[in-house]
Amino acid sequence: MSKMHYAWLFMRKHKYLITTIIIALIVGVVDQDSFLNRHPRRVRIDILQREIDNYKQQYNEADKKICDLEDNPKAVEKIARERYHMKRADEDVFVIAGEPEEEIVNDLELNE
């Protein structure tokens, strides 16, 4: 008997195993929604989910600050004094100038 005949007999005997292997290869490697394509998508989804959580946290903090500004006049005064260096008529304000925070961080990163 020829090699083709032995191959045909092997395929007839193990047809379910061969079919399962072919389907697993198609689903696992070749298909558009294969396991190889799913992993980078899952990583991207996780990154985007972390960004969403970060933005939600920033939104909640900003919303809290807005509510605090609407309800508390002392908070408005605090922001006016800290950010805009405003003062009352009978006060003196001394501003100590230094390096901006970003430059300090960049210098630290360069030194490491």
Image: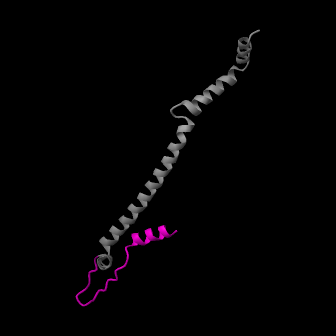
| Nearer the observer, 58 or 73 | 58
User: Which residue ends up furthest to the left in the rendered image?
Assistant: 89
Q: Residue at x 34, y 71 (%)?
A: 68
Q: Is residue 45 left or right of residue 24?
A: left
| Nearer the observer, 91 or 29 | 29
The correct choice, above or below, for 37 with respect to 82 in the image is above
Residue 4 x, y percent position in the rendering = 71, 12
Q: Is residue 44 left or right of residue 98?
A: right
Q: Residue at x 70, y 17 (%)?
A: 11
Total marks in image: 0
Is 103 included in the stretch rendered in magenta?
A: yes
Is 52 included in the stretch rendered in magenta?
A: no
Q: Which residues are magenta?
A: 84-112
Residue 22 x, y percent position in the rendering = 62, 25
The correct choice, above or below, for 54 with respect to 111 in the image is above
Q: Residue at x 61, y 29 (%)?
A: 25
Residue 51 x, y percent position in the rendering = 44, 55
